[in-house]
Image: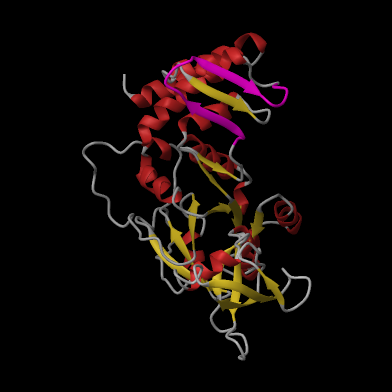
Amino acid sequence: MGILEKISEIEKEISRTQKNKATEYHLGLLKAKLAKYRSQLLEPSKKSEKGEGFDVLKSGDARVALIGFPSVGKSTLLSTLTKTESEAASYEFTTLTCIPGVIDYNGANIQLLDLPGIIEGAAQGKGRGRQVIAVARTADLVLMMLDATKKDVHRHLLEKELESVGIRLNKRKPNIYFKIKKGGGISFNSTCPLTKIDEKLVQMILHEYKIFNAEVLFREDCTADELIDVICANRVYLPCLYVYNKIDQISIEEVDRIARQPNSVVVSCNMKLNLDYLLIILWEYLNLIRVYTKKPGQPPDFSDGLILRKGVTVEHVCHAIHRNLAQQFKYALVWGTSTKYSPQRVGASHIMHDEDVIQIVKK
């Protein structure tokens, strides 16, 4: 019995089992087994098959993976937003390899990867699905392209495919401390009341992974699935933006309903509708900021800003300018929204905001 057969058997068993107090241990064990087999499926095989066009070098300030079913308009979006031409046609599977493009926005170079269309069963390797998903794991953001005329069927199928290979969309890491020890058995603690899991189930899940000595501390009320995610330690937590294309083919009421959903943007690639708003939202979701530098006695250089992530300090800015600058740093003068008055003299731990201007004074 191969891994795929085992996975489908467990999935059938889970769907057959009623969810109640009496079956929660059985379900917890099944979920642990399922996660274990799926992890084995993701491990590269010994005889690695040579695939072309999937090893794309990471470049630019951020990387965005464009995921979706065939013929939803991914290639059209790539050709519209970037200067790269990706073949677009009215038949399915036009794109067969990964095509990178670069969006030049606010002075930042955002790498956009047009991946081949995912089909149902991609996680099991159908339609080059595994290679597509492997590239998606390296991105900073997933841009899920959906057909507005197909309701939410595609969205649920894609979420399920990505979920099954350890990509968690718009979720944060569970607050569970977990450490394998050499002896002493399993020590279990929690800093809050647990309603979805108990000590017995935690031990059963750990034993399924052949872990008999470990320290587990729950800092929030988590589920068995979240504990399995922490044990596997190969999950990727990515922000996801749902882009609904072809809004010119549905009613205005339906467009309004979709646009009000969380993390959703409505566009029409063919008619170039709402693409400028998509770029604004993309910038926000990538958490990018621009910091401009200023030399003493000269105006700020607004032509070439530093592209950094939200929450960076003055020390990070020093490293971005030159690797030895932080060692010679004395103080900095900052103009912008991160200060109470302009200019303000700040230290290395000061947090920068978007469009701040900085002048660094060396020792």
User: How many discs mark residues in the rendered view?
Assistant: 0
Res. 191 image quadrant: top right
Residue 310 shows in this picture: yes
Q: How is the image coloured?
A: secondary structure
Residue at the image point whose x is 58% and y is 78% from the top: 361
Residue at the image point whose x is 63% and y is 16% from the top: 198
Residue 12 shows in this picture: no
Residue 277, given in percent of the width and then of the height, sits at 66, 67
Residue at the image point whose x is 27% and y is 50% from the top: 51
**Front-most of 345 and 59?**
345
Q: Which residues are magenta?
A: 174-194
**Front-most of 234 and 12?**
234
- The residue furthest right is 340
Q: Is residue 328 above or below residue 88?
A: below
Q: Quadrant of the C terminus?
A: bottom right
Residue at the image point whose x is 62% and y is 58% from the top: 285
Q: Is residue 185 above or below residue 298?
A: above
Q: Is residue 192 shown in magenta?
A: yes
Q: Quadrant of the N terminus?
A: top left
- The residue furthest top is 22
**Front-most of 334 and 18?**
334
- The residue furthest front is 363
Q: Is residue 214 above or below residue 264?
A: above
**Front-most of 110 and 200?**
200
Res. 351 image quadrant: bottom right
Residue 280 relative to residue 143: left or right: right
Residue 130, given in percent of the width and then of the height, sits at 38, 42
Res. 100 image quadrant: bottom left
Residue 8, given in percent of the width and then of the height, sits at 43, 23
Residue 16, given in percent of the width and then of the height, sits at 55, 16
